[in-house]
Image: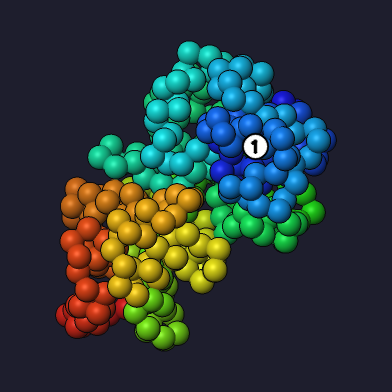
Amino acid sequence: MKNISVIGAGSWGTTLAILLANKGLSVTMWVYEPDQYLAMQQTRVNERYLPGVPLPESLQLSDDLPAAVKSAEVLVMAVPSHAMRGVCRQIAGVVRKSQYIINVAKGIENDTLMRMSEIIDELLPTPTDHIASLYGPSHAEEVSRGIPTAVVSASSSLETARKVRDLFAVEYFRVYSSTDIAGVEFGGSLKNVIAIAAGICDGAGFGDNTKAALLTRALAEMSRLGQILGAEARTFAGLSGIGDLIVTCMSKHSRNRYVGEQIGSGKSLEQVLSEMVMVAEGVKTTRSVHQLTRKYQVEMPISEQVYQVLFHGKSPHDAVYELMTRDAKEED
């Protein structure tokens, strides 16, 4: 694993490309937007998505997607979750079975309700045991500056999970391995919905008690849905579960928390999204979670209220009132 292509030049893709290049590996990063590609070539900084962080001299930039794919032993898929299917279709004819594919996008596709690794597995010729996902509490703004971070590499193959672990591990970026790829992906995706809820709490002026209750009960419903869909309960107590939940709900860097905060303060979803440069994955994932709860008849009260606030204009105060006045029950 010495020749890597990072597919996508957002903040996280750029951060991982920098990390790998600084390890002395041969790294190419594919940049989708032509103006961004030209600007990065000239300035050697991704000012749009990761300002102030210089690109290593060894990091190669490319605007040729098939060429970037062909040159690599490992593909790091760092495109937004809603773009994953389209990009996979574009590269299906050039991906080799010998390549490893590492997904770092967090989300559940609308309508198909597929995780990102499942989309990759469906569309690309790479064997299932060569596919992994890298998730955890890892804001690009901090990792790119060498702030200590821990994540988890997950694959159906423990050997692949360990290879990915070793590929990314450096002194400030600790990587654990797991074979529960479903649990890791569900944890890292579902927490984005809860981060929107946490932001709504902040914007609406609720307190620390509210947010503590939110995170605790959200973890229970995340685990409940995950287990129905084949994940292990213990995974939600790990880095891609409670770890990612904490950082995404509490951090100033969280785009999903920001969306919720703006909505809680009175803005519409359309207004908030129109003002953002980066993607808040939790908005689309909220739709998918709503579809999953209907399909599997599983109780997800917090996620359901987020759906109602985002897409049906429900008042955040009304949503919290409904959550607080639900029928009494034992804690699960």
Q: Quadrant of the C terminus?
A: bottom left
Q: Amino acid at mark 1?
A: Ala
Horizontal side of 256 relative to 138 (left or right) equals left
**What's the residue at 45%, 49% (across, down)?**
279
x, y percentage for residue 168?
70, 43
**What's the residue at 56%, 55% (across, down)?**
136
Name which quarter of the figure residue 307 lies in: bottom left
Horizontal side of 225 relative to 151 (left or right) equals left
**What's the residue at 75%, 57% (across, down)?**
146
**What's the residue at 36%, 60% (across, down)?**
272
x, y percentage for residue 258?
44, 65
Element at label 1: helix
Name which quarter of the figure residue 219 lies in: bottom left
Q: Quadrant of the N terminus?
A: top right
Which residue is more in the foreground, 125 or 320?
Answer: 320
Residue 109 at least partly seen: yes
Which residue is more in the foreground, 271 or 322?
Answer: 271
Near mark 1 (Cα within 10 A), the count class, few <14, some 14-19 or many ≥20, is some
Name the outermost residue toward the top.
93
Count of numbered tags? 1
Which residue is more in the foreground, 120 or 87?
Answer: 87
x, y percentage for residue 62?
64, 26
Residue 213 at least partly seen: no
Q: Which residue is mark 1?
A: 39
From this view, report whether residue 276 is shown above or below residue 69.
below
Colour approach in the figure: rainbow
x, y percentage for residue 195?
42, 65
From this view, report whether residue 38 is shown above or below residue 195.
above
Which residue is more in the foreground, 255 or 155?
Answer: 255
Horizontal side of 252 relative to 212 (left or right) equals right
